[in-house]
Amino acid sequence: MTSIDAHAKVNIFLKITGYREGYHTILSRFMRVENLYDTLYFVPAECDTFTIEGCPEVPRESNTIYRAWKALNEATGDLDLLEYFYHHKVVVEKRIPSQAGLGGGSSDAGAFLRLTHRVCDLRISLEELARIGASVGADVPFFVHDYPSANVSGFGEIVEPFDEAPLPLEIYTPPVACDTAAVYRTFKEHFLSGIDPASFSSWEKLPSKGLLERIDDPALLNDLYPAALLTCPRLKEHAREGWFFSGSGSSFFRLAKKS
Ligand SMILES: C[C@](O)(CO)[C@H](O)COP(=O)(O)OP(=O)(O)OC[C@H]1O[C@@H](n2ccc(N)nc2=O)[C@H](O)[C@@H]1O
Ligand SMILES: Nc1ncnc2c1ncn2[C@@H]1O[C@H](COP(=O)(O)OP(=O)(O)OP(=O)(O)O)[C@@H](O)[C@H]1O
């Protein structure tokens, strides 16, 4: 069977650098989470329409996998792509929690694009695939490139590999759903005017382990943390000493203790 793992990410740091065209520009170190992933399967089946199984709570039209398929069709006009999914359904084994700052939906879209690129033998570059992914979500280009660690900038479309091994991480996802758009709205209203790019100059050159060991305040590493606390006040009950905050939340993470 044809399958691919779609790993979660954490943002080791996430700094907002500006705002334009309705989106925030960022500088962030993304790191793949090795031991947390969804799995996508392309399973032979005769389908009247593009079929996804395994995400019953997400309407098909808003599923990032469906949106990635639509975007790929529109960009390439490749008829084999249509044909393939009349004879295969997409089955997803979900393990990454939603609205958790771990990029679950974006990772599914990135993995779907990579696997489709391979099985349908699409004649487009990885850069083009990442551009198509960006139309599905800001985090998708990182997952298309599939680097273990990368510096991500622009709205999320500039992805540069960072040479380090992924760190063993412990993740804690509280039962609080953080809506990314709402957290960014709060950031814009309360914090955007106070950003100070000099305060994180050259962070993109520093290894993730050193950053996490040197800076112990999660709000210094992640500009969206104060905005998430304001947007979802229940998060406060779950904050613990020594844990960092990923993306727009709600997950916390720390370096896994050696056993
Ligand atoms: C918080 C992060 O996950 C960090 O990795 C990303 O910046 C957000 O990535 P994402 O979940 O893929 O975001 P999208 O689904 O593209 O956008 C959701 C909403 O968040 C806001 N948004 C998103 C990305 C960005 N750079 N600036 C924004 O202001 C926009 O209002 C957008 O409508
Ligand atoms: N394949 C998918 N898997 C999970 N959620 C999806 C998927 N497609 C669409 N969604 C929708 O997207 C919403 C956000 O899910 P996702 O897990 O991507 O968010 P997130 O944890 O906020 O990610 P981020 O790290 O980008 O902030 C979900 O509530 C769900 O309605």
Image: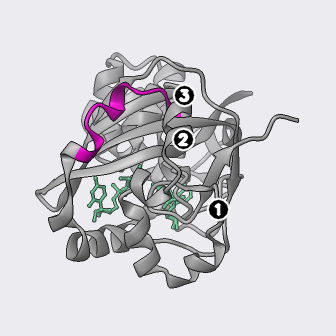
Q: CA distance from mark 3 to mark 2?
A: 33 Å
Asked whether residue 107 appears in the rendered view, the answer is yes
Element type where label 3 sits in the image:
helix
180 on left or right of 157 = right
Amino acid type at mark 3: Leu
User: Along the polypeptide, which appears first: circle 2 or circle 1?
Assistant: 2
Vertical order, 5 against 128 (above or below): below
Q: Residue 115, labelled with which disc?
A: 3
Q: Is mark 2 within 8 Å of ligand 1?
A: no
Tell me if residue 207 is in the magenta stretch: yes
Q: In the structure shown, which secondary structural element does the residue marked by tag 2 occupy?
A: helix
Q: Residues within 10 Å of mark 2 (few under 14, many from 20)?
A: some
Residues under labels 2 and 1: Cα distance?
Answer: 13 Å
- State the residue at coordinates (20%, 58%): 195
Query: Residue 77: where, in percent of width, then height?
Result: 28, 33
Q: Secondary structure at mark 1?
A: loop
- For residue 162, side relative to residue 170 (left or right): left
Nearer to me, 183 or 137: 183
Q: Which residue is mark 2?
A: 212
The label nearer to you, 3 versus 1, is 1
Q: How many marks?
A: 3
Return the x and y of residue 116 as percentages of the image width and height: 50, 29
Residue drawn 63% across the image and 79% down it? 237
Q: In which quadrant of the rendered image does the C terminus lie?
A: top right
Q: Which mark is residue 241?
A: 1
Q: Earlier in the sequence, mark 3 or mark 2?
A: 3
Going by the numbered disc 2, the residue's amino acid type is Leu
- Point out the stretch of residues depicted in magenta: 199-208
